[in-house]
Image: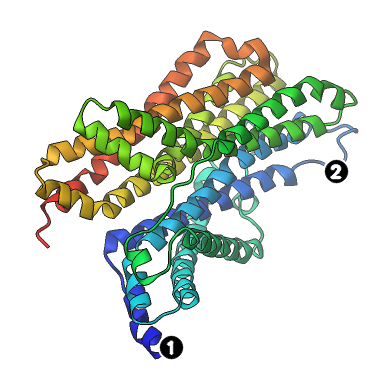
Amino acid sequence: MNALITSAPLLLRRRGALADALPVIAFTAATAIIATVIGGAAAFARRIPADITGPVSAEAQLMPFLMLCALFASVLLIPSAVGLGGSAARLSLARRERDLAAIRLVGGTTAQVGGIAVLDVAAQALLGAAAGVVVHMLAAAPLTALDFGITPFTVGELLMPWWAYPLLIAGVVLLAAASAAVSLTGVVLSPLGVARDSRTVRMSVLRLLIWGALIIGFLLFMQIMPMIDSQGSNLGMVIAIGFVAAIVAGMNVAGPFLVWVAARIAAALAPAPALLVGARRLAADPRAGWRAVSGITFAMVIAGFLTIIATIEPSTPEDQMLVTALHTGGMLTLGIAAVLAAVVTGVTQTARVIDHAPQIRAQHIAGAEVSQLHRARLAEITLPVLLSSVVATFTAFLVLLTMFGGGAADPRTVILYFLGVLGAYALVVAAVLVSAPLVRRAALRTA
């Protein structure tokens, strides 16, 4: 125990401003997005009249449907934000792997080392979650200026009840601790196991089968949904929204398997050294490769859903109110998804460069030019991005064609979706440019 207490500062000390800031930024963004989405959905729910069978305004009549739309946006955004929090926990833990090995070498037990590591992650989550709540509160005032075609929301309506904020912060901290604990199960906590990063990559086709089962279940349910809603109930629509959320979340289950398969094929057929190096890195850690583009994939799915809204033509004042609400809500959802994608992409790509710094330095010493290292990293990014484009396009248009039929085949939807894809690729380019100086710094480091 004395040895553990003496060596614990190794784990708690900061290893670099940028490396330590990345998990906190991710926790901040995840908390702010979750709080903003929940607050917005609750604002619509509060405006639903207790009795809509009597004489009520057109706005009040629209509220139940708008509430369903807000619920739809929530089930799309919140799981991705929660996933960002889990990724931040794993990223924070990765910053400490050498220190974990040092503590094990001086006599710390597996339980003691794991406990300290989880507490360190929880501390960063607490800091990020508190900052995220502040960001959410600051963003509430600008959001009241959005035009939903209805009476503008007030700041009070967009904020959650005071008691919800401690629960949210506690939830983020518990999520971070649980993610860190699960990540530790993939590391051999022996004195050399941590230092060598002894992990086993296990990819099963079951991941793809789970996603396929969700898609088949959704298609089958859409055949019977009209019968469920025939009595004016919205139960069928609520279940359909749940299926869509499950399919979108399932992309992150199937994605790593697809990256692993594609990376192994690319490594076997690589015509250039840069592609070979990038593909082998992906094959060694397909989960991290997919996490780097998961936010972009999600943003492209949202862009696909938004295209059908953009083609709706209002014919009455009530329709105009509905279309305005859908347009504004869709653009807000896409904006939040873009912020989420930017944070996920930027944080993950920067973290991967930091993680691979020793390999980058060794490759440079072995004769690789800095330009070749950049090309290898570009190849490592390009393959998951291309896969994410295919997965996102398939998912978005599967849902649109199933739920809206031929309307989703409007040529304008293709153009609008193409613009959304270009925006997603712009995020990738920005992430590459932001972290490119770190590659040169790692390659030319003298110590």
Where, quadrant-wise, is the N terminus in this rendering? bottom left
Q: Which dot marks residue 235?
A: none
Query: Is residue 430 visible from the viewing direction of this image?
Result: no
Q: Is residue 310 above or below residue 286?
A: above
Q: CA gap, disc 1 to disc 2?
A: 61 Å
In the visual, does 441 lie left or right of 343? left
Give the residue number, with chain letter if any, for mark 2: 50
Q: Residue 438: where, in percent of width, then height?
A: 21, 50
Q: Of marks 1 and 2, which one's residue comes earlier in the chain?
A: 1
Q: Quadrant of residue 342?
A: top left
- Considering only vertical position in the picture, is 129 above or below 63? below
Q: Secondary structure at mark 1?
A: loop
Q: Which tag is nearer the camera, tag 1 or tag 2?
A: 1
Q: Residues within 10 Å of mark 1 (few under 14, many from 20)?
A: few
Query: Relative to 343, is 308 above or below?
Result: above
- Residue at the bottom extreme, as displayed: 2
Q: Residue at x 50, y 75 (%)?
A: 111
Q: Can you give x and y, in whole percent of width and height, for residue 304 in the image?
A: 53, 24
The x and y percentages for residue 324 are: 61, 26
Name the amino acid, label 1: Met
Write the residue at 32% across / 49% down.
Answer: 352
Q: Amino acid at mark 2?
A: Ala
Q: Residue 240 or 213: which is nearer the viewer?
A: 213
Can you identify the residue that label 1 sits on?
1
Res. 415 visible in picture: yes
SS for callout 2: loop
Taking the image as shown, residue 88 lies to the left or right of residue 165, namely left
